[in-house]
Image (cartoon, rainbow, N blue to C red):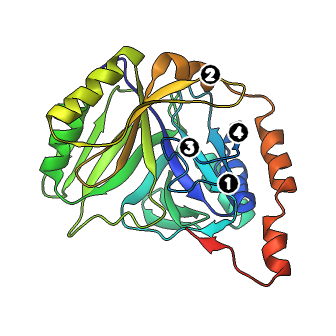
Amino acid sequence: MATRRALHFVFKVGNRFQTARFYRDVLGMQILRHEEFEEGCKAACNGPYDGKWSKTMVGFGPEDDHFVAELTYNYGIGDYKLGNDFMGVTLASSQAISNARKLEWPLREVAEGVFETEAPGGYKFYLQNRSPPQSDPVLKVTLAVSDLQKSLNYWSNLLGMKIYEKEEEKQRALLGYADNQCKLELQGINGAVDHAAAFGRIAFSCPQKELPDLEALMKREKQKILTPLVSLDTPGKATVQVVILADPDGHEICFVGDEAFRELSKMDPKGSKLLDDAMAADKSDEWFAKRNKPKASG
């Protein structure tokens, strides 16, 4: 499993201006690439919507060796109801804390040297007041689970992740594919995991030849396959193959063929300008305001 990589987490965003400001100006990430699509994704990357949408990849460095965020924006949808499924992203960056203070972005110290803040839409980020490790400032993504042991069986035994930490009394575990990669933290909660409309998706890559075997394994184990092996096109870029799975709590998981994904995910120096141009051309806010109507909720 040493060849598997943690890639990104997908967030649905309703306000691209404020979201871009948070990731660029507060966290200090850069726009790695921006893509516009005329119709919904075959693997529901943008959620259960079939209209025009955009995808913006943001991170602290190239996708080859950084865990990044994928921001999906569905034109005409202004907000998404949050569930209790996504519990936060933790990153090490004293610079982000200083940026937040400078911009008066709300921060709350929740532990010594750890500050909680929110991206537009209510997604929580935990900022550690220290220099980032050399590999990547993004340390972990935390997801809620209803049965820790069942989840560990799925993520470790079936998906091959190494268990780095496990605390029974706190009902938490930390897993990953490699020491220098972003980790996945599973946090037990009381009751069911509710994904609501804002639900995200975590993505990993593996050698393309492993995808059919992964799908066959999930079939054998009677686990949920949301999208069987499918090819996804991006205008003017590499076509990738993906399988979309769901864990016992319904968290969406994308596995993509690594070779083509490295081609697709090459950093685009025009990414930031493409996003700015798309935001300037998007008149949907004006259209709704003129008619005194709110944008739809997801």
> Which of label 3 and label 1 is nearer to you?
3
Instruction: Compare residues 67 and 166 and report the one nearer the observer.
Output: 67
Location of mark 1 (residue): 26
**Quadrant the C terminus occupies:** bottom right
Give above or below for 165 relative to 48.
above
Location of mark 4 (residue): 35
Q: Are marks 4 and 1 in contact (CB under 8 Å)?
A: no
Crowding at label 3, few (<14), some or many (≥20) Cα neighbours within 10 Å? some
Which residue appears at 71% of the width and 39% of the height? 34
The reply to whether residue 167 is in sight is no
Instruction: Compare residues 107 and 5 and report the one nearer the observer.
Output: 5
* Mark with earlier residue (2, 4): 4
Amino acid type assigned to the residue bearing label 1 in the image? Val
Residue 137 pos. (x, y %): 53, 38
Which residue appears at 45% of the width and 22% of the height? 257
User: In the figure, is residue 143 to the left or right of 223?
Assistant: right
Amino acid type assigned to the residue bearing label 3 in the image? Cys
The reply to whether residue 26 is in sight is yes
Location of mark 3 (residue): 41
Amino acid type assigned to the residue bearing label 4 in the image? Glu
Label 1 and label 2: CA atoms lie apart by 31 Å
Instruction: Compare residues 292 and 274 and report the one nearer the observer.
Output: 292
Q: Residue furthest bottom?
A: 292
**Quadrant the N terminus occupies:** top left
Residue 62 pos. (x, y %): 62, 27
Residue 222 pos. (x, y %): 16, 41
Label 4 and label 1: CA atoms lie apart by 23 Å
